[in-house]
Image: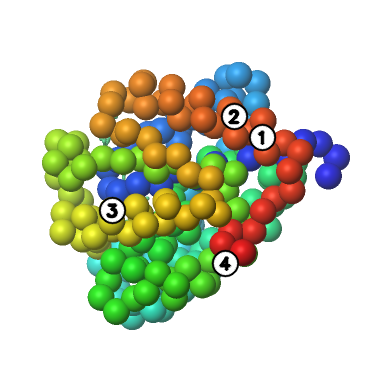
Amino acid sequence: MTCRRGALIVLEGVDKAGKTTQCNKLVQALQDSGRHAEMMRFPERSTKIGQLINSYLENKSNLEDHTVHLLFSANRWELVPLMKEKLEQGISLVVDRYAFSGVAFTSAKPGFSLDWCMNPDIGLPKPDLVMFLQLNPSEAAQRGQFGTERYETSVFQKAVQQKFELLMKDPSVKCQVIDAARNIEDVHADIKNHSVNAIIAAENEPIGELWK
Ligand code: Z5A
């Protein structure tokens, strides 16, 4: 490694928690302060696997539940070489959803254990910081109607929230719960502060392996 590596920063949370809004603001703020930072998102819908996922999410095709879970994971793995390359170049990656969404959404379906859901993502680049944007369902409802994509119902989102809460208790992952009910600027200030600390802490550390 010829330079200090970038940090892998993940934003997670239920629908409409403000993840995309905050990822964009964080990347902009980091760049404005002279740091190298780029945004990524999962699912990354532009790849061949991503297109299968997109069609499923838009209810244009049906996929068996185990199959789609493995496709979401494969969609992360196919981006790993690029992620590592960027991190090693000193670029911090701000990621909109990651393996935690994968596990939370599938394990909220009947018949899926947390362990089975985590297995395919074991060994992915480990985030230096995961920020879980917490927003209760009534506050989320004030941000507009659910869209038409699969999973966008309040009952399912509540089940997903409970799974996220379990995952956030895992001591092997550095996790920060963020109160996402505040205004956009206050949430941003909090997220930026945690992110800068994580970037400094990660600089001389090797990239870890998730859930290993
Ligand atoms: N999924 C899965 O099953 N397995 C996996 O492995 C992965 C994902 C990775 C697509 O994800 C679906 O895939 C998702 C999980 C599943 N299904 N669901 N539900 P996606 O990331 O593409 O989902 P999305 O629909 O694009 O994002 P989102 O979750 O709905 O929204 P968000 O990114 O959290 O929020 P936002 O777009 O930034 O903001 C939403 C609105 O609220 C917008 O009008 C903002 O202006 C407003 N907003 C934002 N912040 C605030 C504050 N602080 N106050 C007031 N209003 C605000």
Which residue is the site of mark 3? Answer: 161
Residues at marks 2 and 3 touching, judged by CB atoms closer than 8 Å: no
Looking at the image, residue 31 lies above or below residue 63: above
| Residue 140 in picture, x, y percent from top left | 20, 41
* Label 4: element kind: loop
Disc assigned to residue 201: 1
116 lies left or right of 143: right
Which residue is the site of mark 2? Answer: 197
Which sits earlier in the primary sequence, circle 3 or circle 4? 4
22 lies left or right of 48: left
Looking at the image, residue 172 lies above or below residue 186: below
Which residue is the site of mark 4? Answer: 122
Which sits earlier in the primary sequence, circle 2 or circle 4? 4
Q: CA distance from mark 1 to mark 3?
A: 29 Å
Q: Residue at x 17, y 37 (%)?
A: 139
| Residue 163 in picture, x, y percent from top left | 33, 59
Looking at the image, residue 125 lies above or below residue 202: below
Q: Amino acid at mark 1?
A: Ala
Mark 1 Cβ and ligand 1 under 8 Å apart? no
80 lies left or right of 142: right
Q: Amino acid at mark 3?
A: Gln
